[in-house]
Amino acid sequence: MQHGVAAAHKGVFTAEVLSNQQIRECYWRVNLKLDAIGSRYFELAVPGQFLEIDLSGLSLPSEKNIPAKLHDIASRQIILRRPFSFSDIVVTPTQDGPCVKLEILYCVLGPATLRMMTLQSGDTLSLIGPLGNGFSIPQNLKQAILIAGGMGAPPLLHLAGYLKRHYPSVQTICFAGARSCEDLPFTLKIGNLTGLVLEEFDVLGVDSRVATDDGSAGFRGYVTDCARHWLQTNPVDPESAVIYACGPEPMLAGAARLAEDFGLPCQVSMERMMACGIGLCQSCAIETKTIAAETEYKLCCKDGPVFDSKKVVFKL
Amino acid sequence: MMHQDVDLTVDFAGVKLANPVLTASGTCGYAEELGEFMDVSALGGVVTKSITLAPRKGNPTPRIVETDAGMLNAIGLANIGLERFLSEKIPMLEKLGTAVFVNVAGQMIDDYVAVAERLAKEKAISGLELNISCPNVKQGGISFGTDPALIRDITRQVKQVCGGKPLIVKLTPTVTDICATARAAVESGADALSLVNTFTAMVIDIESRRPVLANRTGGLSGPAIKPIAVYLVNRVYNEVARPAGVPILGGGGIRNGTDAVEFMIAGATAVTIGTANFVQPDCAVAVIEGIRSYCLRKGLRTMKELTGSLR
């Protein structure tokens, strides 16, 4: 497997909010239009990379729109940027160079995402990106098996669309899991033959399956077990198939075990608390295995966030 | 009226700086990371992350957590160690075009001495900053920084091997009397004082009833600590630094020119930008411009007119 694709250029720039919509219970989708500088940075961005947004200047939603469980932390003054993956990028060539629009899915979880709810069309934001190394796509890739857990789904939705556009011969299937039906950041619909599928992947022409821990939708159990069942009945060629996973760390560890059992390469997108996202603060350490059977810390922001699952010592 | 520009240069313990703004240790990597976002040569200088004799992996994660107007970190002095720093980073630092101060850390006095002695031989390095105030390592670090007798010992021994390069001693604010530790450093040969390092602090996850940081405690930085840092700079300036003629490198929560000017009025000869680099990687450039425009507005022509000008 080749190494991740490094960003050619990155920097600080501004983006304009085009729309900001609630899509489900606590899930929102914001669409941004990048300025000329940002558009040049993002023209070649790949799925799995991320960006940092300064949300410190935003105000809180009105009292009645603050969920009860976030009431106490709502007033915390934030200072650090927040890292986000993106679920799609659209590059439009213009006379003055590329114009990039990107889509971010977010879950309202704390003081920063709470403030994001107030974003309106025409607002501007300061962004840094694209950051980190995204998913790598081997030349001979024929089959991509995507495993998404909860809010880990957005970069895999991006990857599914990216593969459709740039590698149309690659067969892609996405397994999306969550604790419960309402924790899935997607719209469910009845597929033609296969039971529940995800609308967002279906419109791309990408096959999908749903798993919930509580059985409230699709397969009852872990998403990695759902993928395991599928692999048991749908043999894939380890030479030309790759598992791409993004989600909570125990799920990524499960994807790594699954990959090992079926002899498949596996790329996992990791997550850590980050202060900067650009290699300055050294806080986002990921323990990785070295050749000498020892371990060392790599940085999630610069060396990742996508890692070869065989290299990672997962925190369980 | 003639428009008189401001002379931003400062003499910092014998090192001529283009302006009084530096990036703080541990917040600008080995300086090359910051170079991706700004022209580092525009800075007064950089203070690299801590270098130790042997490489250090650092602490397990989580290593940071955000707090009200601040953050806690417990990185644990993760660094590539002296040998790799010399072979991999010095060639890049030579070409940086700004003053480079290397932060030195260790577990025992001998470690500090060995690292300082070797680094002092490098032409690319303008001076050393002695880290005796890291709250996140069990040995060395803050245990040196809270005991005036140990500060005297380590400062004297390290100063002997600095080969004429200025030695800055970085003080912890987590002491009863910062003037006692400042005095111990200055009386033992420190050419400058750097303050403040972070404040030892804790954040608890009430669901699990565990500290959020794997290290349990971390160092608080950011705007939350600024008024305390300004106060401590002013105290040390009045009671130790000014009488001894030793400059202060002041910092703690600086985000803009106004913040920096406040520290300089309190007594700092130069200032460091720390946590703000994480949010705005080119923050230091804006701080330099902010100081310049303040001086223009107030009719100040040199940085000497600003430092310690508290009424």
Image (cartoon, coloured by chain):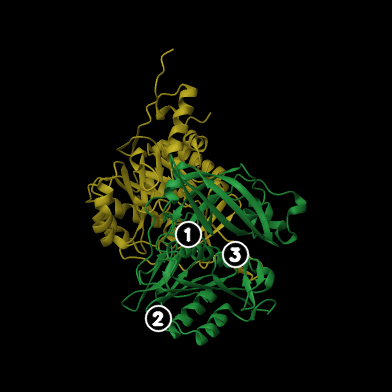
Q: Residues within 10 Å of mark 3 (few under 14, many from 20)?
A: some
What's the residue type where badge 2 is placed? Pro
Residue labelled with disc 1: B135
Distance from the alpha carbon under mark 1 to that under mark 3 = 48 Å
Check the image and name the residue furthest to the bottom.
Answer: A232
Q: Residues within 10 Å of mark 1 (few under 14, many from 20)?
A: many
The image quadrant of residue A307 is bottom left
Pointer 3 and pointer 2 on the same chain:
yes
Check the image and name the residue furthest to the front.
Answer: A192
Report whether A210 appears left or right of A269. Answer: right
What's the residue type where badge 1 is placed? Pro
Q: Chain of mark 2?
A: A
Residue in view at x 66 percent, y 52 percent = A117
Q: Chain of mark 1?
A: B
Report whether A74 appears left or right of A243. Answer: right
Which chain is assigned green? A
Q: Are marks 1 and 3 in contact (CB under 8 Å)?
A: no
User: Which mark, by number, is residue A238?
Assistant: 2
Label 3: element kind: helix
What's the residue type where badge 3 is placed? Glu
Q: Residues within 10 Å of mark 2 (few under 14, many from 20)?
A: some
| Chain B as rendered: colour | yellow
